[in-house]
Image: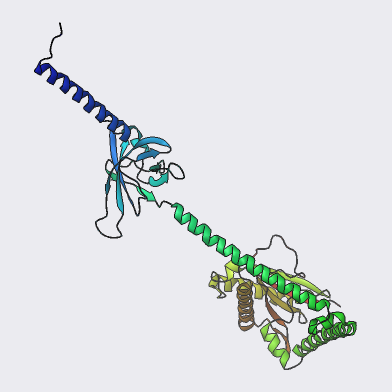
Amino acid sequence: MRREMTRWRALANAGFVLAVLAVAAYGLRQVSSRKWGWQPTFRVKAGFASIGGVEVGARVRFQGIDAGVVESIEPPSRPGEPVVLWFRVDERLHPLVRVDSTARIVPQSLVGAKIVDIAPGKPDSPVVADRGTIGVETPMELVDLMKQAAASLKRVDAVAEAAEKGLGEVNAIASSIRKGKGSLGKFVRDDEAYQKLVALSDHGARAVGALDDNLAALKRTWPLSRYFDDKGFYDRERVLFKPGSERDSRTLRADDLFEPGRSVLTEPGRKQLDDVAAWFAKTKRPKSEIVIAAFTDDARDPDLAQILTQEQADAVRKYLVARHGIDSAGWFTSRKVAAVGFGSQTPRSAANDPGAPARRVEVILFTPQA
């Protein structure tokens, strides 16, 4: 005998089935979106210029770890403002997310869905607060990469085309030269013209050498010699090389003589030069010559180093001549005093003193030997 189901029993069964379906749907939604109501989480946000197709429920990773989901998206209130993504992140990872952490949007695969990856900040940075803000890295879209690659290929094609054209022109020129066409081709194939050019070059070298000798002699001819005496030198390479003279010198640190990086004598520097003048007075060598040579170790700009040391040598010469008259060797006779700035270069004829300071002024006395 079959019993019929009462109305209330049928309603109870229907309600039970609906409840089971509702719980299952809720659980499936929570699992799919990683929003388990019983799991502790914290919220953090980041503003992107473009979110590149990221949607609510997209996965959030921290150093590759499945860390949370995109909870909500706030569109910009005005054009040009960023799109704000709110993330719900596992509370267990909260101590690892710092204020200087950054979020970036990356694809799961070449054509897959987009996810958000959070990179950690510095270990000594403070932990980001709940509902705090972190920085972002601009995502690189595949379209942008393809545009950059296309532009690079165009530049490579242009370079290759120019190289091919240039090579063709070089081949054409070489061919015309081999055939003796044009002025250069005729010259290459004409031995007589080549010999004339070699002879002309040799003649020019001899003429330049003779001109240098004449100019050197002219420098020592009165009254031009007075100008070059005041200027202080004739030849930097030869001014320190006097094999027929006895050499005696005093070395002074440039930092003790001048203001830093200048050619202005300081008061302690003047006192040191007074001591040098007293040393000269004791020598009593009327036929001697004096050379004031300045050096530096600043090789960043050789031209500026040359100018600085020349002015420093001139300043020392001017002080010793004006204050102590070291250019005077007696009645109606004078002593040559040369001032030479060598910059950061060391001449071949300079004395090799490894203990000498790099920034220095050498006052050298040369006395001819019989």
Picture quarter with the N terminus: top left
Q: Nearer the viewer, residue 292 or 46?
A: 46
Q: Nearer the viewer, residue 281 or 5?
A: 5
Report the residue at 9% width, 18% height from top.
7
Q: Is residue 106 left or right of residue 311?
A: left
Q: Using the rendered view, name the quadrant where residue 69 is placed.
A: top left
Residue 237 at least partly seen: no
- Can you give x and y, in whole percent of width and height, for residue 153 in the image? 56, 60
Q: Is residue 101 left or right of residue 276?
A: left
Q: Using the rendered view, name the quadrant where residue 208 is placed.
A: bottom right
Q: Determine whether 5 is above or below 209 in the image.
A: above
Residue farthest to the top, as pictured: 1
Residue farthest to the bottom, as pictured: 223
Q: Nearer the viewer, residue 367 or 283?
A: 367
- Can you give x and y, in whole percent of width and height, for residue 143 in the image? 45, 55
Q: How is the image coloured?
A: rainbow
Report the residue at 19% width, 25% height from top.
18
- Can you give x and y, in whole percent of width and height, for residue 277 in the image? 65, 76
Picture quarter with the C terminus: bottom right
Count of numbered badges drawn on the protein: 0
Residue farthest to the left, as pictured: 7
- Can you give x and y, in whole percent of width and height, for residue 276 in the image? 65, 73
Q: Determine whether 43 is above or below 227 in the image.
A: above
Q: Determine whether 104 is above or below 254 in the image.
A: above
Q: Using the rendered view, name the quadrant where residue 310 is placed.
A: bottom right
Residue 89 at least partly seen: yes
Q: Determine whether 355 is above or below 286 in the image.
A: above
